[in-house]
Image (cartoon, rainbow, N blue to C red):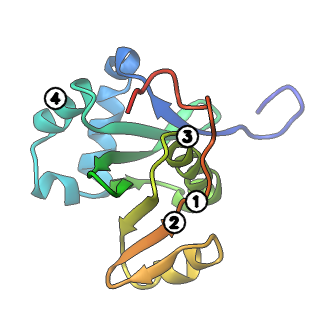
């Protein structure tokens, strides 16, 4: 509880230089709540790509306790660029849905990316449809229709 008697919900990107403080909890979340990402890479490989700044780690925290982890990747092409949510998992996911997606969208806009996308089960359509996401095959996409000048996260340079 905070001083005002309300609970504190936070969601944000983890800079590479503080990643070691989150490694153990990330491993617990990945191994406990979903193994999807472990079907395409080992946990050691995931850490390597996070440390090499090729992937981004976002966490959702409730009262300073990490509950949710999200792995994203900026995908740049000559004409079209996107922020792709590669994996997400944890507990109390709905607690972070609106704030997390807003922060990811802001990050995409600040980096002049045209799209924020992720794949998920069909029932997610109900949960994210009112946030502007439209199912496109099995992938949910939200076009980023605005750009924010001078607001890119100073930790990441894309």
From the top left corner, tell me how far across and down residue 84 is, in percent.
35, 55
- Going 54% across and 36% down the picture, which residue do you hit? 12
- Going 47% across and 54% down the picture, which residue do you hit? 91
- Could you classify mark 1 by the number of other residues whose Cα lies within 10 Å: few (under 14), some (14-19), or many (20 or more)? some
The answer to whether residue 137 is left or right of residue 152 is left
In space, the residues marked 4 and 3 are separated at their CA atoms by 25 Å
The residue under label 2 is 143
The residue under label 4 is 48
- Going 16% across and 29% down the picture, which residue do you hit? 48
Q: In what quadrant of the picture does the C terminus appear?
A: top left
- Give the mark toward the camera: 2 or 4: 2
Q: Are marks 2 and 3 in contact (CB under 8 Å)?
A: no
- Give the mark toward the camera: 1 or 2: 2
- Give the mark toward the camera: 3 or 1: 3
Sequence order check, earlier mark of 1 and 4: 4
| SS category of the residue bearing label 4 | helix
The residue under label 3 is 110
Q: Are marks 1 and 2 in contact (CB under 8 Å)?
A: no
In space, the residues marked 2 and 3 are separated at their CA atoms by 13 Å
Q: Are marks 1 and 4 in contact (CB under 8 Å)?
A: no
Q: Which mark, residue 97?
A: 1
The answer to whether residue 17 is left or right of residue 153 is left
| SS category of the residue bearing label 2 | strand
């Amino acid at each position: 509880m905070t001083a005002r008697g309300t609970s504190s919900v936070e969601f944000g990107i983890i800079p590479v230089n503080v990643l070691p403080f989150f490694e153990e909890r990330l491993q617990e979340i990945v191994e406990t709540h979903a193994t999807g990402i472990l079907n395409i890479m080992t946990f050691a490989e995931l850490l390597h790509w996070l440390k090499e700044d090729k992937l981004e780690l976002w966490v959702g925290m409730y009262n300073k306790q990490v509950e949710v982890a999200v792995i994203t990747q900026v995908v740049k092409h000559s004409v079209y660029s996107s922020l792709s949510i590669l994996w997400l998992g944890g507990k109390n996911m709905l607690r972070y849905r609106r704030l997390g997606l807003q922060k990811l969208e802001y990050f995409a806009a600040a980096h002049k990316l045209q799209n924020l996308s992720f794949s998920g089960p069909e029932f997610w359509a109900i949960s994210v449809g009112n946030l502007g996401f439209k199912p496109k095959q099995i992938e949910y996409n939200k076009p980023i229709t605005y750009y924010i000048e001078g607001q890119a996260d100073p930790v990441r340079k894309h």
